[in-house]
Image (spheres, rainbow, N blue to C red):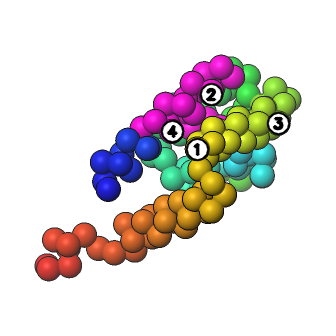
Amino acid sequence: MSYAIFQLARAHRAHAAALLRAMDLHPGQELLLMQLFDRDGQTQSELLESVGLDHSTVSKSLRRMQDAGLVVREPAAHDRRVMVVHLTDKGRSMREPIAALWQALEETSARNLSEQQAESFVDTAYAIAEALTSRALPQEESE
């Protein structure tokens, strides 16, 4: 089962990356943009926490996104060391294309599944994720 999960994640990530490249985005940047679509003007720390990526990955992605004209980073008024990230007009214009990308990815991913199989897969995937995140590793349990 673990190898099947690995293969699935790898294939999904590769297909998503190809779709993102066509939009001049790198994987993960769409997640940051989606967080900013929901609430513009977040600090880098808030974005880091919401997407669950490490600091260096988020920092590098935001730098690339700023270079591409999608976001601007400005020091916070309350603390000049804290950086607040805002969408630019170009960044805001990515909302619909990103939504369409995720819709296309979902349709492609489920095209060989019945509706019942798709629903069952989602339930199973969440159950596996819960099992992996809610239990200590076996060696931690014995200590």
Give, as a three-letter code, the residue at label 3. Answer: Glu
Q: Earlier in the sequence, mark 3 or mark 2?
A: 2
Residue labelled with disc 4: 12
Main secondary structure of the magenta stretch: helix
Residue 84 visible (yes or no): no
Give, as a three-letter code, the residue at label 1. Answer: Asn
SS category of the residue bearing label 1: loop
The span shown in magenta is 10-33
Is 17 placed left or right of 89 in the picture? left
Front disc: 2 or 4: 4
Q: Quadrant of residue 2?
A: bottom left
Residue labelled with disc 1: 112
SS category of the residue bearing label 2: helix
Residue labelled with disc 3: 96
Residues 20 and 62: in front is 20
Q: Within 10 Å of the Cα at label 1, are there few (<14), some (14-19), or many (20+) other Cα atoms?
A: few
Is the N terminus in the top left, top right, bottom left or bottom right quadrant?
bottom left
Front disc: 1 or 3: 1
Q: What separation in Å lies between label 3 and label 2 (alpha carbons)?
A: 13 Å
Q: Earlier in the sequence, mark 1 or mark 3?
A: 3
Front disc: 3 or 4: 4
Is 109 placed left or right of 74 in the picture? left
Front disc: 1 or 4: 1
Q: What separation in Å lies between label 1 and label 2 (alpha carbons)?
A: 23 Å
Q: Earlier in the sequence, mark 1 or mark 2?
A: 2
Q: What separation in Å lies between label 3 and label 4 (alpha carbons)?
A: 21 Å
On the image, the x and y values in percent for residue 25 come to 63, 26
